[in-house]
Amino acid sequence: MRALPLLVPLLLALAGFTAEAAEVDAVPDGGTVVLRDLGPVRLAGIEPAPSPAARKELAELALGRDVAVEPVTTDRHRRLHAHLRRADGLWLQAEMLRRGLARVFTTPDDRARAREMLAIEAAAREAGRGAWAHPAWTVRTPRTAWRFLDSYQLVEGRVVSAERVRSEVFLNFDADRKKDFTVRIDAEALRLWRAAGLDPLGLEGARIRVRGWLRSWNGPFIDASHPEQVERLP
C-alpha cells in the first residue's frame, strides 16, 4: 500500500482533478508540503527563498490545515506541482510571494497565473520585503550577469537589437554579440509568443526584465521558453 501515495499525484495531474480538503501533514521546506494520502506537493510557479524563514512561515500558513489542490504538472521525481488554497481562501503561493519569501518561477506547463503572481512579487520586491532585502536576490544588470552563471536570476536592461536567426530570436543587450548578455527564444517558445499575440522582435529598444537560468554561450544568456519570463518595463 505504500506505493499508492506515489501514484496518486500523477493520476490527479493527468486527470486534471481538484482534490478538496487534503490535510498538510508536514512542511519540509519553503516550497513543499506533504499532504495526507497524497505525499509531497511542490507549490507550482514559485521558487522559495533559500532560508529557514521561508519554511517556518509556510509551516505557519499551512501545517495541520486542509487545502484545496489544483494540480498543474508533475516533475521527473513524480512529485505533483499544484496551486494550493486554504479553506478560508488564502492562496499559499500568493502569500509567500507577498511576504517576499518566494519569487515567480514558471515553466511552459505552468504559466496560467504568471501575470497575477508577477504583480504580487513586484510589490514585495519594491518594498524590500523578506529575501528581497538580501543581496542574493538583487536584480542583475546585463553587465553583471556573467558573475551569476548557473543560477536562477532576474536581469533588467535595454534591448539593443532583436534579430531572427533561422528559427530563433535573439534579444541582444550590447553591440558585441560574442560577449553581451542575450535572451534566446527558440522555435518552440516562439509558438507560445505567437499564441499570446506577442512578437519578441518588437522589443528592440525596450527596457525589459527577464528571469531564468543564466548560462554561458557567447556570453551569459537566458533561454526564454515562454513569454511570461519577459516583462516590458516603462
Image (cartoon, rainbow, N blue to C red):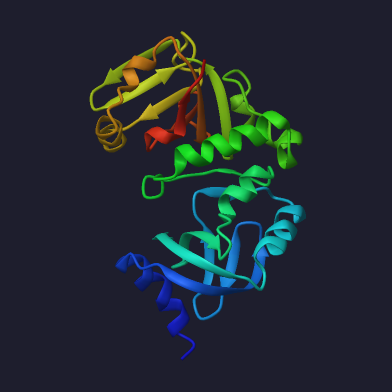
Quarter occupied by residue 4? bottom left
Q: Is residue 93 left or right of residue 51?
A: left
Measured from the top left, where is residue 171 in percent x and y? 40, 19
- Of 204 and 14, the residue lying toward us: 14
Measured from the top left, where is residue 9 in percent x and y? 42, 71
Residue most extreme to the bottom: 1
| Location of residue 102 with respect to 207 vertically, above or below | below
| Location of residue 90 with respect to 219 vertically, above or below | below
Q: Can residue 163 be seen in this view?
A: yes
Measured from the top left, where is residue 227 in percent x and y? 38, 33
Count of numbered circles on the image: 0
Q: Which residue is drawn at 28% across and 31% down?
A: 190
- Of 174 and 32, the residue lying toward us: 32
Measured from the top left, where is residue 13 in percent x and y? 36, 65
Q: Is residue 138 left or right of residue 93?
A: right
Q: Is residue 199 left or right of residue 151?
A: left
Residue most extreme to the front: 88
- Of 71 and 40, the residue lying toward us: 71
Q: Residue at x 51, y 21 (%)?
A: 181
Q: In this view, does 181 lie to the left or right of 187?
A: right
- Of 95 and 27, the residue lying toward us: 95
Q: Which residue is drawn at 66% across and 36% down?
A: 124
Q: Residue at x 32, y 23 (%)?
A: 169
Q: Can residue 149 be seen in this view?
A: no
